[in-house]
Amino acid sequence: MVEALKRVLSLVGGKKLVVAGFAVACACTYGQERPLVDPAIPLAERMFPPLAPLLEKAVRQSARAIGSNLEFLIAQENIGVQRSRMLPSAGGYMTYSYAQDRRLDRADPLNAAKLAYSMVMTQPIFHWGALKAGNDYGKLTAKIAENNYGETCRLLVLELRAAYLRMVVQKAGVKRAQFALRIAETELKQAEGQLKAGAIATAEILTPQRRVRQTQLEFERAEEDYRFSRVTVERLAGVEAIDERSIPTSVAEVPFPKDRLRALAEHFNASETSDGNYRLKIAQLRVDQEKLNYRILDKALRPKFNVVTGVTQDEVSYTGSPADRARTQSLYGGLNVTWNVFDGFLTTTQRRASMLRVRQLEGDLDERQREQSESVRNQMKQIEFAARSTAMAEEMLAEYNLMVAVRQDNVTRGLSAPWEMESVTIARDGVLLQTMLARSDFLGRIADFLSSIGRDPALQTLVPPRS
């Protein structure tokens, strides 16, 4: 995998490091795509096609995904750091000097050119499995970073869906606030005309003036909320701007395929697998990683065996003839043994701490495994609650739609004044906004459930395949 990373980086250059990193991350996590979720299960991107490309861009180029992806790249490079300890190492020194030696047994100084050097190559051969454990430790670190990247993308996709639905509802809210402001301004103009005609007292103009100020405030607030929601969606998706014309102003009714959702939940609970649950995978990897750390510490005080070979050259002064000086060149090879016999109980203390850490991480893993099925059960309950809440909102909306239709008929027949039609329309629009919020919450609950069991279509190329 490191070699693949190097090839990609060499092709794209340093300025495109993040793009290359994403490509490698996808290569690491992509296998066979698992079956797509049943099209009958509602998702925001299926109801709003412009959302689908935003989700795709979010996991590729948003700031959050890029930051997590860089952590993954760093962990990939650290595999090479651990592996390097198993490979040969070579090094040495060379010194050339012109020296003048003054000795007590000679009257004159002795001038001489000196060349000394040493080159040594060392190959570890037996470290009681500690080197391999270190290499495996680095690989697990990369797997943890990979799953952190997947969890980041999973949460990002959920947040982007919710932000998009909120933006749609708030755009509809701007239209409602604008309609209410237009009605209030019309009423104020009518009141001003009546005041000029002397039909009403001066004090009676205060109420429509206050209503205009209030609706103006609500309109400006709705516009700012919508603007901020749009900026949030753009930031989460990592795009410059969203085409205003592509943003819808309504959330349609959401079907409830109860049996199909329950079948997915039952299959997930029966599979006894952690696929799609990145947090559970990370917990298991941390346990395995700490066990490797314990193995490394357990071998710290044992002798280490290495093969060494090298060449040296240095001067030799013979005491029998001080004027003579020789250079000795030595080629050698052999076995090197290093043994740290006692380190002040440092290794013993670290080993005990590692064992306690393993127990702690195993406890966290057991807790997450117990949470898994219960969490899915709770999500199914929340979906059912959201479905019931949405159904009640739909009933109320149907009642208000009927009231609008009746009032429209009465206005047409001259039985009601036009302002009465406007009043009931504003009330109906308020109920419509609440219904849209209920539909959005329902969609969000379904998406959260699919994401937690690893069935989110937006993550098909990021989630490891189900066995």
Image (tube, helix red, strand yellow):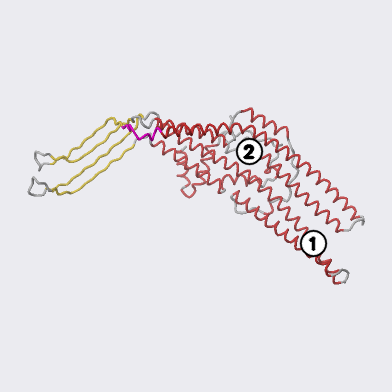
> What range of the chain is rendered magenta?
338-348
What separation in Å lies between label 2 and label 1 (alpha carbons)?
A: 45 Å
Q: Viewed as shown, does residue 131 lie left or right of 454?
A: left
For the residue carrying disc 2, how many other residues have a C-alpha within 10 Å: few (<14), some (14-19), or many (20+)? many
Q: Residue at x 45, y 36 (%)?
A: 138
Amino acid tagged 2: Ser
- The image shows residue 398 at horizontal and vertical percentages of 82, 45
- Check contact, mark 2 vs mark 1: CB within 8 A: no
Q: Is residue 426 above or below residue 272?
A: below
Instruction: Nearest to the eye among marks 2 and 1: give it.
Output: 1
The answer to whether 311 appears left or right of 294 in the picture is left
**In the image, residue 119 lies at what x, y percent?**
27, 39
Image coords of residue 113 (percent x, y)? 17, 47
Q: Secondary structure at mark 1?
A: helix
Residue type at tag 1: Ala
From the image, tell me which residue sits under label 1: 184
The residue beneath circle 2 is: 451
Asked which secondary structure carries label 2, the reply is: helix
| Residue nearest the observer in this picture, 457 or 128 | 128
